[in-house]
Image: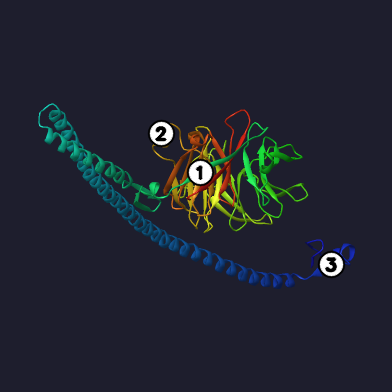
């Protein structure tokens, strides 16, 4: 017998002494159990063998599929390379063609102008000779002809000045643009008021529905009454004593501001509230879009790389993120350190200032409806030959044109929504140095500030033509 409890063979004598209440089985039963187990084990092994065969088959089909897909990818890569190469060869060919057209036109103009210059020089020399001769009649006739020739040349000089063309590259498209638009619109500015504030500087400025100005100076946000010599009627400081960055009046008696990693709100009860935390991003610039969304521009000063990071973030009325515009290798939204200022057009697209504060250099970047760079403006070659173009503020007029304050060149640049230059305004002619933040009013007037002196100045201007 076999004692299952003690797991040993036992004899008849032992059963009565030590195994009376144990479960016992005969040896024959053990053999029968063994046969059952053998049969069961065979079934298990067969199942496991089937599983192994399935895995081996799967490995073989995976390897085969891998080779098939890899070959397809390599073919697609080769095809794409050829397609991209042909695409950019076409662009370069188009560029060469456009340059040839401009060079040809410039050479023709050059020859024509040189011929007129030579004609005038020769006539002037002839007059000098005739003035010393006794041929008075010829002298008088030549003087009359020379006068008419010079007057005609004066008109031609102006015509040639406005017909000059230049190459332009918008990502995906090479074209020739005419510079005549810089002469086609008459812009008018007139200064109506100058207000001296008690603040050392103004770093951000906005206006509410009642026409009250709101400015940020240092840690403080001040509400100013322009109708009363720009007197301060309210001052607000964050409980945390942090320095706000940008301030923007939205509506419903709400003032939004960027501070640290947060978007905050100064509500109707003049209490500060956090709308959303954007950490680890560093929000800087703030704009209220045509759709009444909050558009926030980021600050990447001190960061090694802004690649694949959000440059603009669109925040809804409840603080939810609605969209992000990323800086990518193929769509360079940010070339410098930070977004200095943002504005939007009637079609909902954005334009902003991409700035480098270290070297005071920047560019205005216009995005299309998909968030891709549509065009870039980096100043005027003649105006910005001494100082780089550096846009402190970009704003959109009622006619959907851009007004840009170029602080360190004392220039206002006026552009169309297509990036074409309309006009350049020398603010020194308006007795305004270092033009800074701009706020447009609805009645064809604007406020602009300057930190040129020891105390910040506010200027009220009337404008028209754009």
Query: Is the residue 297 above or below the residue 33 in the image?
Result: above
Given residues 173 and 409, the one toward you in this image is: 409
Rendered residue at 52%/47% (across/down): 463
Crowd rating for badge 1 (residues with CA inside 10 Å; few <14, some 14–19, many 20+): some
Q: Secondary structure at mark 1?
A: strand
Q: Secondary structure at mark 3?
A: helix
Q: Which residue is mark 1?
A: 189
Q: Which residue is mark 3?
A: 12
Examine the rendering and report whether any part of residue 262 can be seen: no
Crowd rating for badge 2 (residues with CA inside 10 Å; few <14, some 14–19, many 20+): few
Q: Secondary structure at mark 2?
A: helix
Mark before the other along the chain sequence, 1 or 2: 1
Indicate the position of residue 113 as horizontal and vertical percent values: 22, 41
Examine the rendering and report whether any part of residue 374 can be seen: yes
Q: Which residue is mark 2?
A: 385
Given residues 452 and 120, the one toward you in this image is: 120
Left or right: 41 as drawn, with respect to 464? right
């Amino acid at each position: 017998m076999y004692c299952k409890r003690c797991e040993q063979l036992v004899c008849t004598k032992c059963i009565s002494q030590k195994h009376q209440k144990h479960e016992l089985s005969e040896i024959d039963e053990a053999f029968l159990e063994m046969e059952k187990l053998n049969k069961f084990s065979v079934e298990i092994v067969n199942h496991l063998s089937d599983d192994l065969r399935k895995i081996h088959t799967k490995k073989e089909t995976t390897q085969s599929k891998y080779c098939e897909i890899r070959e397809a990818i390599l073919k697609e890569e080769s095809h794409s390379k050829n397609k991209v190469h042909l695409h950019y060869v076409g662009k370069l060919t188009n560029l060469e063609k456009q340059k040839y057209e401009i060079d040809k036109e410039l050479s023709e103009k050059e020859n024509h102008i040189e011929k007129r210059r030579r004609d005038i020089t020769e006539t002037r020399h002839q007059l000098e000779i005739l003035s010393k001769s006794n041929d008075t009649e010829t002298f008088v006739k030549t003087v009359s002809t020379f006068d008419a020739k010079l007057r005609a040349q004066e008109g031609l000089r102006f015509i040639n000045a406005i017909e000059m063309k230049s190459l332009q590259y918008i990502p995906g498209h090479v074209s020739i643009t005419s510079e005549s638009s810089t002469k086609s619109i008459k812009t008018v500015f007139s200064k109506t008021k100058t207000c001296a504030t008690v603040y050392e500087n103004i770093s951000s400025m906005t206006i509410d529905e009642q026409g009250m100005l709101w400015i940020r100076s240092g840690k403080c946000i001040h509400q100013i009454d322009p109708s009363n010599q720009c007197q301060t009627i309210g001052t607000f400081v964050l409980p945390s004593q942090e320095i706000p960055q940008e301030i923007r009046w939205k509506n419903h008696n709400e003032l939004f501001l960027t501070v640290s990693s947060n978007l905050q709100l100064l509500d109707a009860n003049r209490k500060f509230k956090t709308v959303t935390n954007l950490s680890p991003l560093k929000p800087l610039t703030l704009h209220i879009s045509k759709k009444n969304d909050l558009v926030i521009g980021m600050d990447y000063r001190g960061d090694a790389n802004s690649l694949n990071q959000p440059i603009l973030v669109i925040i809804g009325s409840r603080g939810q993120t609605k969209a992000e515009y990323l800086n990518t290798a193929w769509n360079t939204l940010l070339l410098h350190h930070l977004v200095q200022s943002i504005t939007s057009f009637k079609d909902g697209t954005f334009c902003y200032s991409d700035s480098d504060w270290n070297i005071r250099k920047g560019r205005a970047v216009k995005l299309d409806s998909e968030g891709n760079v549509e065009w870039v403006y980096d100043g005027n070659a003649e105006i910005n030959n001494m100082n780089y173009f550096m846009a402190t503020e970009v704003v959109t007029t009622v006619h959907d044109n851009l007004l840009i304050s170029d602080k360190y060149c004392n220039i206002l640049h006026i552009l169309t929504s297509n990036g074409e230059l309309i006009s350049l305004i020398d603010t020194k002619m308006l007795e305004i140095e270092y033009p800074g933040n701009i706020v447009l009013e609805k009645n064809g007037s604007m406020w602009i500030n300057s930190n040129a002196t020891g105390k910040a100045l506010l200027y009220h201007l009337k404008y028209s033509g754009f």
